[in-house]
Amino acid sequence: MDEVAVKPRDVMPENARTLPARYYTDPSLLKAELDGLYGTMWFHAGRSEEAQRPGQYFVRELNGHNIVVTRNASGEIRAFHNVCRHRGTRLCSEATGQFAGSIQCPYHAWTYDLDGRLIGAPHMLEVPHFRKADYPLQPVHAAEWDGHVFLTLRDHSEPLAAQLGPLVAKFRNWNMQDLRLGRRIVYDVKANWKLIIQNYNECLHCPNLHPALNNLSHYLSGENEPLQATYMGGRMDLRPGVDTLSMDGTCPRAILPGLSADDRRHVYYYCIFPNMMLSLHPDYMLTHTLWPIAPDRTINVCEWHFLPSELARPGFDPADCVEFWDMTNRQDWYVCELSQAGIASPAYVPGPYSNREDLLYAFDRFIVDFHAKGTKAAR
Amino acid sequence: MDEVAVKPRDVMPENARTLPARYYTDPSLLKAELDGLYGTMWFHAGRSEEAQRPGQYFVRELNGHNIVVTRNASGEIRAFHNVCRHRGTRLCSEATGQFAGSIQCPYHAWTYDLDGRLIGAPHMLEVPHFRKADYPLQPVHAAEWDGHVFLTLRDHSEPLAAQLGPLVAKFRNWNMQDLRLGRRIVYDVKANWKLIIQNYNECLHCPNLHPALNNLSHYLSGENEPLQATYMGGRMDLRPGVDTLSMDGTCPRAILPGLSADDRRHVYYYCIFPNMMLSLHPDYMLTHTLWPIAPDRTINVCEWHFLPSELARPGFDPADCVEFWDMTNRQDWYVCELSQAGIASPAYVPGPYSNREDLLYAFDRFIVDFHAKGTKAAR
Amino acid sequence: MDEVAVKPRDVMPENARTLPARYYTDPSLLKAELDGLYGTMWFHAGRSEEAQRPGQYFVRELNGHNIVVTRNASGEIRAFHNVCRHRGTRLCSEATGQFAGSIQCPYHAWTYDLDGRLIGAPHMLEVPHFRKADYPLQPVHAAEWDGHVFLTLRDHSEPLAAQLGPLVAKFRNWNMQDLRLGRRIVYDVKANWKLIIQNYNECLHCPNLHPALNNLSHYLSGENEPLQATYMGGRMDLRPGVDTLSMDGTCPRAILPGLSADDRRHVYYYCIFPNMMLSLHPDYMLTHTLWPIAPDRTINVCEWHFLPSELARPGFDPADCVEFWDMTNRQDWYVCELSQAGIASPAYVPGPYSNREDLLYAFDRFIVDFHAKGTKAAR
């Protein structure tokens, strides 16, 4: 086991088994997760820089909801259902864009300001009792954490900070709000979103599947935090002589300015429920955002974020870390898709977890408890 | 409002709202409409000229029915289910064609005459009790109105003329039976068929969506007939100096010979339930025929019909009116598709109609009444 | 009727009609057939030569099951569910291949020997009570008949020979185990699997649909065996001067060495339930293997098998019989697809069988009885 100091893991309960197949294949369970988990928690939607200026917008789709995220005239983040209050027409058909001060429906020209107030409705004044104030765009709650935009579809939700808990303080030194997008790759993964999260939360598969990664960080190194109510994760050690996760382990970029000496020797991997995977490297931030489409299909948006000073440097080229993670991502989606295919077989039966799959077992409990609660609530 | 004399519309009821989403998204409601409306009314299928000679045929598909329309030896229009009485084989696999005097199944050569009588069935005479007379093609009722072919799947239907009512007399001067197809464009619209009908029946969206159309006919001009039992429509005024709806408003074709001076200054738009939209211009006829495929998908066949004398003229080119309506069509399908997308969102709630959307509200009542009747009948 | 001696067929019962549409269109009936017929009988999977050497494998998919067929170190045929016992990952993602002595999961490197025993499971020994012996690959029963590989998903099945019955002796002279694959064509047929079997079991359609075949073998020639419990079939006569079924009726290959003079003048067509159609020619073997995908879709694997001595001959070219059957196949799938389309119409009603469709009517009884039993068993 090389020269790595391995911290032993707790022994798993004797009956620790993977979940029954229906958790990965049953459309009604996915619907329950979309309604009850994605529909009640804050979910990750994008970056503040994508709606930086008033009227700059981006659109996201989740569980049949189509949502426009923009910034109002005062610079506050705003989100609305992309549905005109007149005859239901989708207002924005582009994925990103810039409103010219207001949002106008292409059908009959109903017009809303950037806070969603109806300010124009041709010929509606001929209708008695019609009042513009009754027809604002339907809002979606939006909030920002260090440059990350989160949304929630629940009306009376706790603040985002309450959901994030200790993570806000924990990652403050990374100054994530200062980083800017350098590269985005969108993957269409033929697997359940939970298999992607499980794949992210164990490195037992690394020596076999990711030899390049294992050369940079030994798969038994690092340690996991115990599962929290709204996230789980841990950190891995960079091997001696390795500066970051890149094709050759060298780091051609400046280290993020706020990091401690200890943090410079680790990569943090945190899954923030329900749909964000945040990977913090000494010199860049990697984010995965999951958009479940079907029990066996998930859109997975992967983004690399860098210091603006690095991005501005002539000849800036992130290929060393983009290629490294793109290769590693594809290896991961490959086995996620094989797992989805195998679990869908009538011959699949739950199998035993090793001690190094502790986060997966904990995550499974979280999911099982969620569905059990839903069943009880439905009675 | 320019110089247009606007006829005021009646004020809408205070609670006049668009329909709940399920009318546009629920497959069981579409099925009920296909069975109960399309399945009991006469629906528009095509033009007499498409089955002009004995044995000339065309095929249409509706609600799982595949129907061959042809003409018998006496020149009468005939339609049959495209299903062999032996083992159910589809008889015609081509969309159009010419029978050589009889209809033969490609599988075992059962043969029918153009009235659907079984006239050949190899080796069946070895079967005792087998009588050819027991196995005619199953007929579909077909009828013609001034060159339009209509079908009905109901066995004991009222005559086509009863369904058309006053329209037969109203449009006699257009001599539609004399017109011939000049151009066909088939659109695949990702929207419910009722949204296409609603889009057709108001021009409130015209100044915003169709500036070219609005330049030729002011959107507040004209007037609607009150909703009838089986159709609805009205007419719009051509602006002074405009001769027809074409790219520049000029008319390079002869005016239809039977028209009054008044009719030459208008364009008539009539939706004949369930699936025909008939647009009569001074010099040409435009037809849309709707074929619902799914709650969110409709095949829309758009055809331009002209005087044969015009079609025969050297260098005949209908581009002026084909391009005009193709552009306008595409603008319309664009907003119909945006409406379908928005209405499918869980955030959609019915919105208020203006007074100028009177036909839509009336059509909605017709649809709601239809479904209410069906529910009652099902008890 | 040329000079052919026609053996009269029994007269069909007066009410002998084709099956109601639901047998060809209802997904729940297909599911019952896949579970109850395909899931309990031995079904044809491939040829012994496709898993000739230890570790050589091929993969088949049926009713959601994904199955690896290989040969163990002792040369015995073996089959397993393609599902790792750890987290359910599909083990083989390629359709064919060669294991290097063992089967290793690409995810966490669990490793099985060619008898399915778990022989490696990294880090699992840290888990108390974990025993490798508890996690073998789940077996599927496999057996061989003269070079054909059959599988069964039922645990306590009768031996393959019991299902084949008299066929084992009947076709021994063909020495099918000596033949080798010369050509494979995979057809994706938009028709129910039973329509393909029915099409195979009557030649009443031959004069109309297959004039080339009818030139080589008169459609009224030959005779059928009465329907057996697990197969049905018969044989057709080659016309005088015709040596085999090929484009011109000549035979450029050696006749199979074990055949009698009588067998050299016939082509045998046997449908071995549920999914094999075996066509034995004087000089080659043609097999069709059916894989139902949906009520209206079947993958149909057609293979031509020849004497190795012929395959080894310089310039060997099977085009004469490949083209002949490919042409004939395509004609058959064309009418099968037309039948599927017609039967799916609400206008379809069961039609009368002729006396020459005796096997079809018998097969229908077999299918109806199967479903009736299922219904009774479900009570």
Image: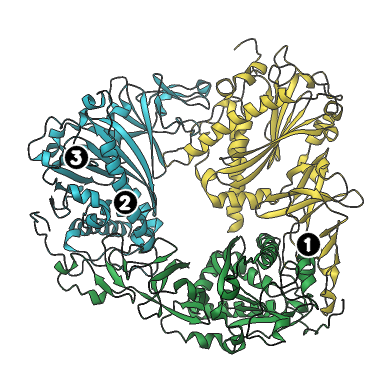
Chain colours: A green, B cyan, C yellow
Towards the viewer: B234 or C240? B234
Q: Nearer the viewer, residue A64 or A286?
A: A286
Task: Tell me the CA gap for discs 2 and 3.
Answer: 20 Å
| Image disc number at residue B317 | none
Q: Which one is closest to the eye, mark 1 or mark 2?
A: 2
Q: Residue at x 11, y 59 (%)?
A: B9
> What is the spatial separation of the Cα atoms under label 1 and label 3, in whole angstroms?
69 Å
Query: Dot 1: few (<14), some (14–19), or many (≥20) neighbours within 10 Å?
Result: many
Mark-to-mark CA distance, 1 and 2 = 54 Å
- Confirm whether circles 1 and 2 share one chain: no
Q: Percent x, y for residue A299?
A: 56, 64
Three-letter code for the amino acid on which mark 1 is drawn: Cys
Residue position marked by numbered label 3 in the rendering: B280
- The image quarter containing residue C314 is top right
| For the residues bearing labels 1 and 2, Cβ distance under 8 angstroms | no
Q: Position of residue C258 (x, y in %)?
A: 86, 25
Question: Which residue position is annotated with label 2?
Answer: B331
Q: Are marks 2 and 3 in contact (CB under 8 Å)?
A: no
- Residue A55: where, in percent of width, then height? 38, 71
Amino acid of disc 3: Leu
